[in-house]
Structures are given as structure tokens and as C-alpha cells.
Image (tube, grey):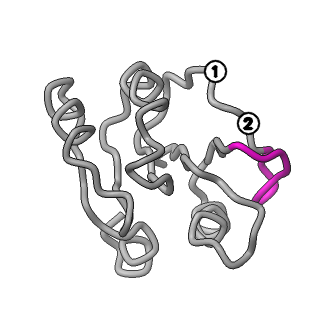
């Protein structure tokens, strides 16, 4: 299963990052939650950016483009196969950096991908 890092994880049940974490776990995907606030989502603690997880297939982005720059090196060092830019997270600068590093940028909604079997 594709291990997924949720960047911008949230304990707020109204946030899409929260919904995605729970849906991924229900479907059997292992997850890593990374966010600014402590807590847990879908039974997985939210960690602060720091530890590099070398076994990540996908990063799903729930951080707006204006707040993404501090995460650039972290994302590139993690070396996922792809980064999904959910609606509102699209970022041409980061997309170019990912492509240069051989990481596939995807502009899509993770929830829709999960619901339609495209994940």
C-alpha cells in the first residue's frame, strides 16, 4: 500500500486533511501526519516537520502556497514518488522543484482520487 504523508494534518473534523487521513486508514493505507498543532488523527499522532520518512510514496498537500516554502527541503529530502496538490494548494514554484528532482506533481483532490479508485 502507498504510504502517505499528510502535510497540513488537522484534528478539526471539518478540514479535508482530517477526512483524508480517516479515509486512507479505513482503506488500509499507512499514514504519517505532519502539522503544526499536536493531537492525533485516525489514530496516528501529528508530528512536527523534522523526521524524514524514507518510505513515503505520496505526500498529499493541505498547506496553502503562501505557507509552503519552509517545507520545500523537507519534501525534497523525503523523496516521495508524487506530491498531490489539493485544491487551493497549487504552487508552480514547488511544482518545478519537484519535477527537477524527479518527483511527480499532481494537481488533484485526494478525496476524489480515493472515492473513484484513482489513488
Residue 115 is situated, as x and y percent measured from the top left of the image, at 43, 80
| Residue 6 forms part of the magenta stretch | no
Residue 47 is situated, as x and y percent measured from the top left of the image, at 73, 36
Are there few (<14), some (14-19), or many (20+) residues within 10 Å of tag 1? Answer: few
Numbered tag placed on residue 51 in the rendering: 1
In the image, which residues are magenta? Answer: 36-45
* 86 w.r.t. 57: above or below: below
| Residue 42 forms part of the magenta stretch | yes
Task: Please tell me whether mark 1 sits on a helix, a strand or a loop.
Answer: loop
* 74 w.r.t. 82: above or below: above
Residue at image location 74% in from the left, 75% down from the top: 13
* 88 w.r.t. 30: above or below: below
Residue at image location 54% in from the left, 43% down from the top: 5
Numbered tag placed on residue 114 in the rendering: none
Q: Which residue position holds label 2? A: 47
Residue 109 is situated, as x and y percent measured from the top left of the image, at 37, 70
- Does the residue at mark 1 contact the one at mark 2 (Cβ under 8 Å)? yes
Query: Which quarter of the picture shows residue 99?
Result: top left
Residue at image location 35% in from the left, 54% down from the top: 84
Q: Quadrant of the C terminus?
A: bottom left
Amino acid at each position: 500500500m502507498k504510504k502517505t504523508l499528510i502535510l497540513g494534518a488537522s484534528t478539526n473534523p471539518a478540514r479535508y486533511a482530517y477526512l483524508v487521513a480517516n479515509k486512507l486508514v479505513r482503506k488500509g493505507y499507512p499514514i504519517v501526519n505532519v502539522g503544526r498543532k499536536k493531537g492525533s488523527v485516525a489514530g496516528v499522532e501529528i508530528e512536527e516537520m523534522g523526521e524524514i520518512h524514507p518510505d513515503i510514496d505520496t505526500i498529499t498537500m493541505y498547506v496553502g502556497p503562501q505557507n509552503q516554502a519552509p517545507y520545500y527541503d523537507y519534501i525534497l529530502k523525503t523523496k516521495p514518488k508524487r506530491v498531490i496538490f489539493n485544491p487551493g494548494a497549487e504552487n508552480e514554484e514547488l511544482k518545478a522543484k519537484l519535477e527537477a528532482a524527479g518527483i511527480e506533481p499532481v494537481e488533484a483532490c485526494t478525496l476524489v482520487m480515493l472515492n473513484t479508485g484513482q489513488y
